[in-house]
Image (cartoon, helix red, strand yellow):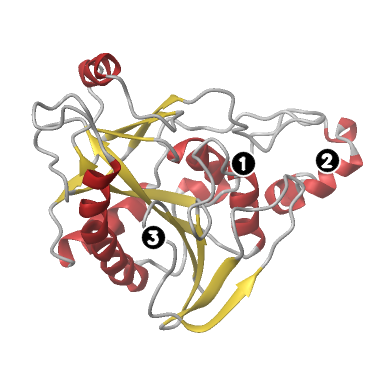
């Protein structure tokens, strides 16, 4: 059975249309996930939904426990994650209300735990292509089917927040050639790769950041109005995407950790092996 995870960003705190719905609380060695996981069936596919900021939007981007969130997804058997995120547009052609299926990240966060490694085990995972091309292709086709104005590919710059950018920062980021700006998909995407979970972002453009003449400053009121329409579209994209996802994975995500660990297996502490069993267990035997 396919198990598809959905991480909902700002405005997307629940999934409608699920049958046999349950709430599942997961404990992890990295603390508590953002909220209880909502599991259910969408047709013949098992879905696992998690609101990134918790129901009621309680956590800032910096406070989200990304390691616990991804670890919990792994424990629940999730093999693919559709990440839904509100973003600012850094290009004229990506108007508020548009969807971007990004394919690259630029990390400008500060001090967020971004790996499951440590505590006696060292590893390095490939991240040159941070998005699963198979899954992003499905998301793009699903967005077109939903009638969205969708852009295929693009670079997502992830800032620490929770403040929006200064105009100077926004203009510098534009010179770097980025396409959208957000606050959450790093380290989420890095951890998904270490967990061997296919990951793609459905980025919902809500504003032009503060670089645009018509958006001298970004306000919550401006964002929320666009976000409501975007979230409805995101739900339809997810419903379209789920049956299009193949049962078996043929991408490299499924074996991303095969050669990642470089620590002598005999030197890895027993507790670390136990804690990382869902992530590394099959490679540490």
Out of 18 and 129, give the one closest to the viewer: 18
Residue 95 placed where, x, y %? 12, 42
CB contact under 8 Å: marks 2 and 1: no
Ranked by sequence position, the earlier of labels 2 and 1 is: 1
Q: Residue at 42% across / 37% down in the picture?
A: 130
Q: Residue at 54% across / 46% down in the picture?
A: 59
Q: Which residue is mark 3?
A: 12
Q: Is residue 141 shown left or right of residue 59?
A: left
The numbered mark at residue 271 is none
Residue 174, compared with residue 182, is above or below; it is above
Ranked by sequence position, the earlier of labels 3 and 2 is: 3
Residue 277, compared with residue 270, is above or below; it is below
Q: Which residue is mark 1?
A: 257
Q: Residue at 55% across / 70% down in the picture?
A: 38
Out of 47 and 247, give the one closest to the viewer: 47
Judging from the image, what secondary structure is the residue with disc 1 in? loop
Q: Is residue 205 visible?
A: no
Q: Nearer the viewer, mark 3 or mark 2?
A: 3
Quote the CA–CA distance across marks 2 and 1. 16 Å
Q: Is residue 218 visible?
A: yes
Judging from the image, what secondary structure is the residue with disc 3 in? loop
Judging from the image, what secondary structure is the residue with disc 2 in? helix
Residue 258, compared with residue 230, is above or below; it is above
Mark 2 is surrounded, within 10 Å at the Cα level, by few (under 14), some (14 to 19) or many (20 or more) other residues, namely: some
Out of 95 and 262, give the one closest to the viewer: 95
Mark 3 is surrounded, within 10 Å at the Cα level, by few (under 14), some (14 to 19) or many (20 or more) other residues, namely: many
Quote the CA–CA distance across marks 1 and 3. 31 Å
Q: Which residue is mark 2?
A: 272
Mark 1 is surrounded, within 10 Å at the Cα level, by few (under 14), some (14 to 19) or many (20 or more) other residues, namely: many
Residue 168 placed where, x, y %? 26, 13
């Amino acid at each position: 059975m396919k198990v598809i995870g959905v991480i909902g960003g700002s405005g997307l705190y629940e999934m409608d249309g699920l049958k046999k719905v349950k709430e599942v609380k997961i404990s992890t060695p990295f603390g508590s996930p953002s909220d209880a996981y909502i599991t259910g069936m969408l047709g013949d596919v098992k879905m696992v939904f998690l609101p990134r900021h918790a129901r009621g939007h309680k956590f800032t981007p910096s406070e989200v426990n990304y390691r616990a969130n991804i670890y919990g997804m792994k424990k629940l058997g999730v093999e693919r994650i559709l990440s839904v995120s509100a973003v600012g547009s850094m290009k004229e052609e990506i108007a508020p209300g548009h969807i971007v299926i990004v394919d690259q990240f630029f990390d400008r966060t500060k001090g967020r735990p971004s790996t499951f490694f440590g505590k006696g085990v060292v590893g390095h995972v490939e991240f040159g292509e941070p998005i699963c091309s198979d899954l992003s292709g499905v998301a793009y086709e699903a967005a077109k089917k939903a009638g969205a104005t969708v852009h295929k590919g693009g670079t997502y710059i992830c800032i620490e927040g929770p403040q929006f950018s200064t105009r100077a920062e926004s203009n510098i980021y534009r010179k770097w050639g980025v396409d959208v700006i957000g606050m959450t998909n790093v380290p989420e995407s890095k951890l998904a790769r270490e967990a061997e979970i296919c990951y793609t972002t459905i980025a919902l453009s809500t504003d032009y950041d503060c670089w645009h003449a018509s958006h001298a400053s970004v306000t919550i009121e401006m964002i929320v109005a666009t976000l409501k329409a975007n979230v409805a579209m995101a739900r339809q994209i997810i419903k379209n995407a789920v049956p299009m996802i193949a049962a078996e994975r043929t991408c490299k995500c499924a074996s991303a950790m095969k050669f990642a660990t470089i620590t002598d297996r005999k030197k890895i502490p027993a507790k670390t092996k136990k804690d990382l069993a869902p992530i590394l267990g099959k490679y540490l035997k």
